[in-house]
Structures are given as C-alpha cells and as structure tokens.
Amino acid sequence: MESSVLRVEDFCAYFGEHQVLKDVNVSISRNKVTAVMGPSGCGKTTLIRCVNRMHELTPNARVSGKMLLLDEDIYSTNPIVVRRKIGMVFQRPNPFPTMSIHENVISGYKLNGIKLKKSEQESIVEESLMKSGLWNEVKDSLHRKGTFLSGGQQQRLCIARALAMKPEIILLDEPTSALDPKATAHIEELITELEQYVTIIIVTHNTAQAARISDFTAFMYLGELIEFGPTEKLFTVPEDKRTEEYLTGKFG
C-alpha cells in the first residue's frame, strides 16, 4: 500500500438521531487524487466536511470512530490546526469579496494571526497563484478585488488560497458544478497537476469526471462506503452490483 495520509476507521456521522455515515473505513494515499462519488444524499459531502471538522459546526451534529491525519487523531486536534492542514474548496467560487486577489491568497495567515514579512507574502502569493495556474492572468492586477475574475478564475483563486497554507490535503466539493465546460476542463487539468504537491479528495456526482482525473475512487450509497479502489479497476470491473448499476446510470 502506498503511504497513506488519511485513515478513516469505523467512522459514523449523525445529524441528531439521523445517521448519515455508517461505519466508513478507507485509507487515502498521499499525493494522489481520490474521487468520492455517489447519488445525491449518499453522504459524500458529509464525509469530507468531517475530514476538516466542519460537520460539527451544524447544531446536533456528532461523530464516532476515528480519522487519522498522518497518524494523529483529527478529533483530538484543535480544529483550527486541522483546517490549516486540510484545505477546502466549495461548489461555488467564494473569494472574500472585500479583499484583493493578493489578500485572498494570504487570508489564511491573517485569519490565523500568523505575521508574514512583505517578501514572504509576495513569494507565497506568487507560488500559490503559479500552482493554481492563475499567475500569468492576474499578476498585473493583484490589488484588484477577486470578484472581478470569471467563475473559473475565481475557483482557481480559491484553490490558490487553500494551497497557500501548504496543507497536506485539499478537499474539493464538486468544484466544477457551477462552471462552464471550458472552465471545468481547466480545473480538471489543474487537479491532475497539483497531485505532485498535495493530496486531493474530490466529491463529484459526475462519473466521467471521476474517471478522467482520479487515481482512486470511492463509491458511496445511503451513507455507506460500498466500494473503494483504483479508479480504472472500479470503473471496468466493479465488485459490487450497486457500483455497476450506478456507473451504468440505473440510478443516481
């Protein structure tokens, strides 16, 4: 097994009495792209919200079981520290509207009270925007608001903002569902380039997208992890009938 960065063991999540994740066990490989797919309401987004401890921000939400980031229990670690190590990018691009592009990229440091010299700020901003494929497009307008960018550029800015903290993992929650095909292709290309720097977990309901960009795929259904393995194997010879039925469009 390649070195794992995240291990999930007998993990359950609840909203009040309603159980949304049922005994999930999975090991996520370092510097790989893992897609989490399944029909709406199957627990995909809840799973990644548990990984960076956002699930518990909902009233009556609770969890049981273990999640280990590099062998450290995520749920015994300060959530602020967890969110530094595990970045998140949402469905809709959400640059901070009052901040410039430059300020957006380093906002994680400001929010965490980490002081940076001007030269450090500049190198982090440039490096993060280079990695997110945005530098050449915005380098002359770093002090303009991030909201003037197109949807696809805004989403890449959000990825740059996540990368700036040098996280172990970036979680992407259907990051292309609000984008047009061209911007989607751009983001997909970017994701495959980024795995040299960071581990990526992407939630998608788009099976073709999972097939195109991921090394491993998890298929979830009704809160359970039905099947997990190398993407090519899962798509060509799924072991579970439900995986096969989902992939052939019988439900979902």
Image: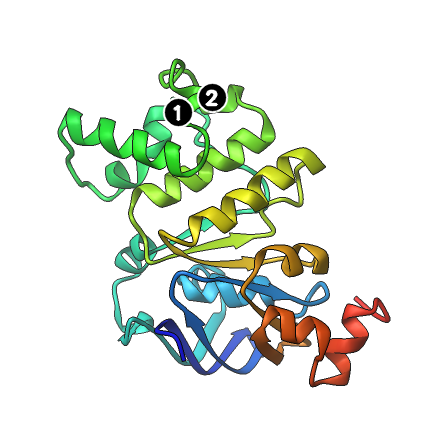
Disc sitting over residue 137 in the figure: 2
Residue 18 makes an appearance in the image: no
Locate residue 83, reporting x and y percent: 34, 55
Residue 61 makes an appearance in the image: yes
- Residue type at numbered disc 2: Glu
Given contact means CB atoms under 8 Å apart, are the residues at marks 1 and 2 in contact?
A: no
Which image quadrant is residue 73 in?
bottom left
- Residue type at numbered disc 1: Ile
Above or below residue 9? Residue 85 is: above
| Residue pictured at 66% horizontal, 37% vertical | 179
Left or right relative to 117: residue 32: right
Query: Regarding mark 2 in the picture, which secondary structure is present there?
Result: helix
Mark 1 to mark 2: distance in Å?
Answer: 11 Å
Locate residue 209, reporting x and y percent: 66, 54
Q: Nearer the viewer, mark 1 or mark 2?
A: 2
- Upstream in the sequence, badge 1 or badge 2? 1
Disc sitting over residue 101 in the figure: 1
Decide which of 32, 143 is in the foreground and name it: 32
